[in-house]
Image: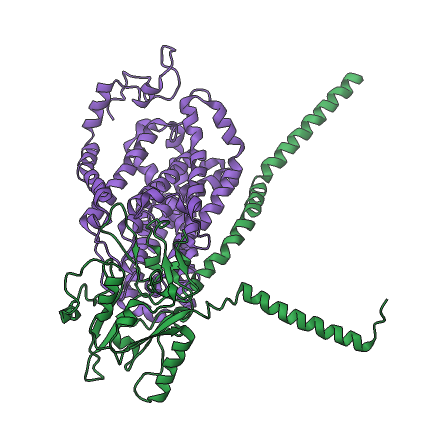
Chain colours: A green, B purple
């Protein structure tokens, strides 16, 4: 047997600690600290560069094979459309929309493109009870129409009002939403059609962490041009599509009240309670039942006792 | 129903055999012991049935149209308000009002309160039908209704709240079928089936409590997916499931009080003496339970406002609406119940139950439609959507009446039991 001296003890101890530290790290990464596909792609949208030419809308329409729009893409009167007091939004015929805003702070309009923001922890995905949504390692949130039931919970859950439903169809309805051109482009490392079509370089495509750096760099290098915030860096746990703006984001139609953490976090309170009820309730309520009916049980037992006594007495009498 | 008169002592049917000793056939039992012409006559004499025919005359084509031309044909096809009346009323409103089954199942079977026995079957039936029709509403609303079993067998997303709702409603529906079957077995005269179920009654009851706690709560938890869309006063991410669960307790009890009141007044011929004699007593008992649930509910509502620091919202217009809802839908019926219990004033309790049940539906519609997207425009449902909702509810009413007319729900079967 090898003799255990002080030196080897310390050596062994250190090695074990190191191993434990390494093991622990890998373990915790596997469980809670999933880093949301660090190699995922993203886009940063610079509102100060967008001129509202709607080329991205046209490119998306062509790439995704969507129906021809009622108003052509070079008609800019669409910016004045107000429906129910709201500007245009995505629907079953359009995965991306550009809207014009006229913030009083500046003397020119700003244009904001909306499409799926491809969240790191998508609410549509976490709310779907048939697993129709997938967040791909490339960063896209894609949708599988062949398992979808049409419950539309994803539309309730999406904090950006992105998924739309093909209400017009009776037999093949489905969710219609931007998929980052996953099938045709992103999968092969190409940028989505809208980014490629942008003549103003308002959309910058790259790894999410890289375009985030680019955004921060622009804020830093041109002081006063941008508000010091990148919308989507932390909103709902971070999104693949992020925005730079020269005016506060709520002035250009962004919802600045969305939570800073993933939507699923507000549901966890309930989800944590489920196993508790499932395990504690059965024993608890059977216990209640036994407690509530104990008087009947005691009466029954006493009756039996009395009967036995009577019987015994009878037997004794007989013997006598 | 005037046909059930003194000169026909053998009807309403309460036994397997007629006066002359021969057995009723199932067909005769279905026709309530009347001939076909007599049955038709009594059916068309009832003005309620004419009202129903009118609803169905327009509602059925609308439902067919929904399946032929899509949801967009009957609703506003809104992407901002994906859930309308079918779910807001049909699922979120019907399910809490059907909590009665597990409430009285627990009272009688688990806590051994045999004094509530006469109302137990009605409560179970009320629960079963409420759930069944909530699923029917869901089948109208789902984009692909033929894929209803997908979350169970084809593609599973077990981490979603709706997954839990789907599984629990499905299992609980089967539990409730099992709980109501003894009534059918008695009526059919198949006693073996009844004995089998009798053995498992405690297990079924406990399963009912677990499933109900979770899915009543889960319906509330569904809205915690939209923390930025529902008005903060109607949404508390911490307590939402408790709000929905606790309010379902008095919702379910109120609904049984309403159903029993209607049955007592319009179907007196069908009730037996025990049911009639006990009704006031059990109504007072249920009102007592409901008022306790209501004060609990109010406290949790208050805790939610305090926890989320929402006091300032109470001073806005939405705050007034919130107070109005709580005042009319909960506080008012709570006092009506309490006063009714104390003074044994059953009529007051019955009016209170009516207000409380409407109040539950009002609360669910507020959460799912009125206060949803509160910073946006207000969605007003399409008239076709309203009509279809009324049609399905009318079908619920007819099925309810059909069963209570026949099965031993509010009367005791006189044959072998």
Residue B405 location (% of width, % of height): 32, 28
The reply to whether residue B328 is visible in this rendering is no
* Residue visible at 20% across and 57% down in the picture: A67
Residue extending farthest top: B20
Above or below, B225 against B354 in this view is below
Q: Is residue A310 in sight in this rendering?
A: yes
B377 or A99: which is nearer to us?
A99
Q: Quadrant of residue A250?
A: bottom left
Q: Which residue is at a point 48% across and 26% down the rendered structure image?
A: B193
A261 sits left or right of B264 in the view: right
Tell me where residue B60 appears, x and y as whole percent: 21, 38
Q: Residue at x 36, y 54 (%)?
A: A144
Q: Position of residue B256 (x, y in %)?
A: 36, 40
Please determine whether, in this image, residue B61 is positioned above or below residue B324.
above
Counting the numbered discs, the total is 0
In the figure, is residue A88 to the left or right of A143?
A: left
Residue B267: x and y, percent?
30, 30
**Is A92 above or below relative to A170?**
below
Looking at this rendering, what residue extends furthest in the front direction?
Answer: A188
Most foreground residue, A202 or B176:
A202
In which quadrant will I find the N terminus of chain B? top left
- The residue lying toward the viewer, choosing from A52 and A79, is A52
Instruction: Please identify the quarter of the rendering in which residue A26 is found.
Output: bottom right
Q: Is residue B107 left or right of residue A77?
A: right
Quadrant in the picture for residue A290? top right
């Amino acid at each position: 047997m090898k003799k255990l001296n002080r030196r080897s003890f310390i050596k062994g101890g250190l090695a074990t600690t190191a191993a434990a530290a390494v093991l622990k790290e890998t373990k915790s990464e596997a469980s809670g600290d999933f880093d949301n596909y660090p190699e995922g792609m993203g886009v940063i949208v610079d509102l100060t560069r967008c001129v509202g030419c709607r080329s991205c809308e046209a490119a998306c329409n062509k790439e995704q094979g969507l129906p021809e729009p009622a108003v052509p893409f070079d008609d800019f009167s669409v910016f004045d459309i107000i429906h129910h007091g709201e500007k245009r939004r995505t629907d079953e015929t359009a995965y991306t929309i550009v809207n014009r805003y006229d913030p009083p702070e500046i003397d020119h309009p700003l244009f904001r493109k909306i499409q799926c923001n491809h969240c790191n922890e998508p609410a549509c995905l976490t709310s779907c009870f048939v697993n129709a949504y997938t967040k791909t390692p490339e960063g896209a949130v894609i949708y599988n129409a062949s398992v979808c039931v049409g419950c539309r919970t994803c539309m309730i859950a999406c904090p950006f009002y992105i998924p739309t439903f093909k209400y017009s169809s009776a037999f093949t309805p489905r969710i219609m939403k931007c998929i980052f051109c996953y099938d045709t482009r992103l999968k092969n490392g190409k940028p989505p059609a809208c980014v490629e079509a942008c003549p103003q370089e308002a959309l910058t495509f790259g790894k999410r962490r890289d375009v985030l750096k680019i955004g921060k760099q622009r804020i830093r290098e041109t002081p006063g041009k941008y508000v010091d915030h990148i919308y989507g860096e932390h909103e709902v746990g971070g999104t693949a599509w992020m925005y730079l703006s020269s005016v506060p984001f709520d002035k250009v139609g962004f919802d600045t009240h969305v939570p800073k953490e993933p939507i699923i976090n507000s549901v966890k309170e309930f989800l944590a309670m489920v196993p508790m009820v499932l395990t504690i309730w059965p024993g608890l309520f059977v216990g209640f039942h036994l407690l509530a009916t104990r008087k009947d049980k005691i009466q029954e037992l006493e009756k039996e006792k009395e009967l036995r006594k009577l019987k015994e007495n009878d037997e004794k009498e007989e013997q006598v | 129903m005037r046909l059930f008169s003194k000169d026909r002592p053998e009807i309403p049917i309460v036994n397997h055999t007629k006066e002359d000793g021969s057995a009723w056939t199932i067909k005769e039992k279905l026709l309530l012991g009347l001939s076909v012409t007599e049955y038709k006559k009594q059916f068309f004499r009832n003005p309620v049935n004419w009202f129903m025919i009118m609803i169905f005359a327009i509602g059925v084509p609308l439902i067919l149209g929904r399946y032929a031309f899509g949801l967009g044909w009957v609703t506003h096809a809104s992407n901002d308000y994906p859930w309308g009346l079918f779910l807001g009323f049909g699922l979120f409103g019907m399910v809490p009002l059907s909590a009665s089954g597990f409430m009285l199942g627990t009272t009688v079977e688990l806590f051994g309160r045999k004094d509530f026995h006469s109302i137990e079957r009605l409560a179970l039936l009320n629960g079963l039908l409420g759930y069944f029709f909530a699923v029917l509403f869901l089948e109208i609303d789902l984009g692909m209704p033929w894929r209803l079993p997908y979350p169970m067998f084809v593609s599973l997303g077990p981490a979603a709240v709706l997954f839990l709702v789907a599984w629990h409603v499905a299992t609980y529906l089967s539990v409730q079928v099992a709980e109501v079957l003894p009534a059918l077995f008695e009526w059919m005269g198949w006693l073996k089936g009844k004995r089998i179920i009798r053995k498992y009654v405690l297990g079924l009851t406990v399963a009912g409590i677990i499933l109900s706690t979770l899915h009543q709560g889960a319906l509330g938890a569904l809205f915690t997916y939209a923390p930025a869309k529902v008005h903060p006063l109607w949404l508390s991410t911490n307590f939402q499931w408790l709000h929905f669960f606790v309010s379902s307790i008095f919702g379910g009890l109120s609904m049984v009080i309403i159903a029993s009141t209607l049955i007592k007044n319009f179907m007196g011929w069908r009730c037996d003496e025990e049911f009639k004699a006990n009704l006031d007593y059990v109504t007072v008992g249920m009102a007592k339970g409901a008022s306790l649930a209501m004060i609990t509910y109010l406290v949790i509502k208050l805790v939610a406002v305090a926890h989320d620091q929402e006091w300032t919202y109470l001073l806005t217009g939405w705050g007034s609406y919130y107070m109005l809802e709580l005042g009319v839908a909960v506080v008012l019926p709570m006092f009506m119940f309490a006063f009714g219990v104390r003074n044994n004033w059953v009529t007051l309790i019955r009016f209170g139950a009516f207000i409380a049940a409407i109040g539950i539906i009002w609360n669910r519609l507020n959460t799912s439609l009125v206060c949803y997207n509160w910073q946006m425009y207000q969605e007003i449902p399409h008239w076709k959507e309203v009509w279809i909702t009324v049609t399905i509810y009318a079908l619920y009413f007819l099925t309810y009446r059909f069963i209570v007319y026949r099965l031993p729900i509010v009367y005791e079967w006189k044959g072998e039991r």
